[in-house]
Image (cartoon, helix red, strand yellow):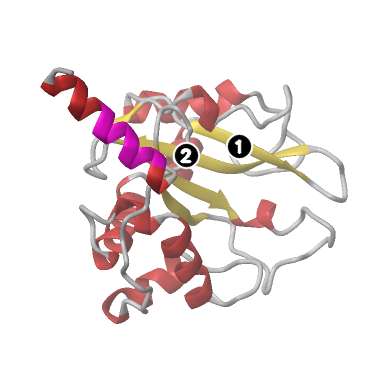
Amino acid sequence: MTQSILIIYFLSLVVFVNGGVPFEFFQFVEQWGPNVCNTGARVSPCHTPPQAKFTIHGLWPSNHSNAHLLCQSKTIYSKVISLEGQLNISWPDLKYGNNDKFWGHEWDTHGKCSDPPFSLFQYFQISLNLLRKFDLLTILKAAGLNPQTSQNLAIQNIMAPIQRTTKKYPGIRCNKNVKTGKSQLNEIVLCLEKDGATLIDCPTFVSNTCAKSFVW
């Protein structure tokens, strides 16, 4: 068995033993507050009425095969005190109002899979930087789009202005309004290289959860 074959075999064994593969890119997921709060078993499941803006849902290490990730970090979540004020505004727990628990969940479920190379602090700092850098609400309003329940949209209506601005294809996700039964814009996803800064086109599996026609 040649050396190269031995290396491939060893790497395959590591992946198998650990039950996952290393991450290859990030999904930066922003959610539209009002449409998080009018879906599900209850009409208003949110802790307090959310503002009409995009907030962070999470920064999710992913891979192009959409396979289970290998998460090596042993770092236990602890509150990032120096970022807490910014996180309370930009990354709130809309449903239950327990911001710290929400951040801990996102670190334990996703963030650990990016450590290494990113520390817990860097994970949250990168997320805040991305929200500031890519103002989706301003981008959509500049294209003549505003949140309203009466305007029927297609994925391209949301995707096109973001693609023109970022030069990359985003992911668009919807949920269902429990009162109207309509499909509605829920999340917009920007995809980035492993450096957490360089935008890439989102793979097709990131998107396509919206009906042919939906509202914002």
Determine whether, in the image, residue 160 is placed left or right of residue 201. right
* Label disc, if present, on residue 162 of the rendered structure: none
Determine whether, in the image, residue 187 is placed left or right of residue 149. left
- Position of residue 162 relative to residue 125, above or below, is above
Q: Is residue 96 magenta?
A: no
Q: Is residue 135 or residue 44 the one in the foreground?
A: 44
* Label disc, if present, on residue 173 of the rendered structure: 1
Q: Secondary structure at mark 2?
A: strand
Residue at image point 49% right, 49% down: 30
The x and y percentages for residue 170 are 45, 30
Q: Is residue 2 or residue 155 the one in the foreground?
A: 2
Q: Amino acid at mark 1?
A: Arg
Residue at image point 41% right, 63% down: 107
The reply to whether callout 2 and callout 1 are in contact (CB within 8 Å) is yes
Write the start and end of the magenta stretch as one range: 9-16
Q: Residues within 10 Å of mark 1 (few under 14, many from 20)?
A: many
Q: CA distance from mark 2 to mark 1?
A: 8 Å
Q: Quadrant of the C terminus?
A: top right
Q: Is residue 71 or residue 52 the one in the foreground?
A: 71
| Residue assigned mark 2 | 189
The x and y percentages for residue 142 are 45, 35
- Position of residue 203 relative to residue 13, above or below, is above
The x and y percentages for residue 207 are 56, 30
Q: Quadrant of the N terminus?
A: top left
Q: Is residue 22 visible?
A: no
Q: Amino acid at mark 2?
A: Val
Determine whether, in the image, residue 208 is placed left or right of residue 123. right
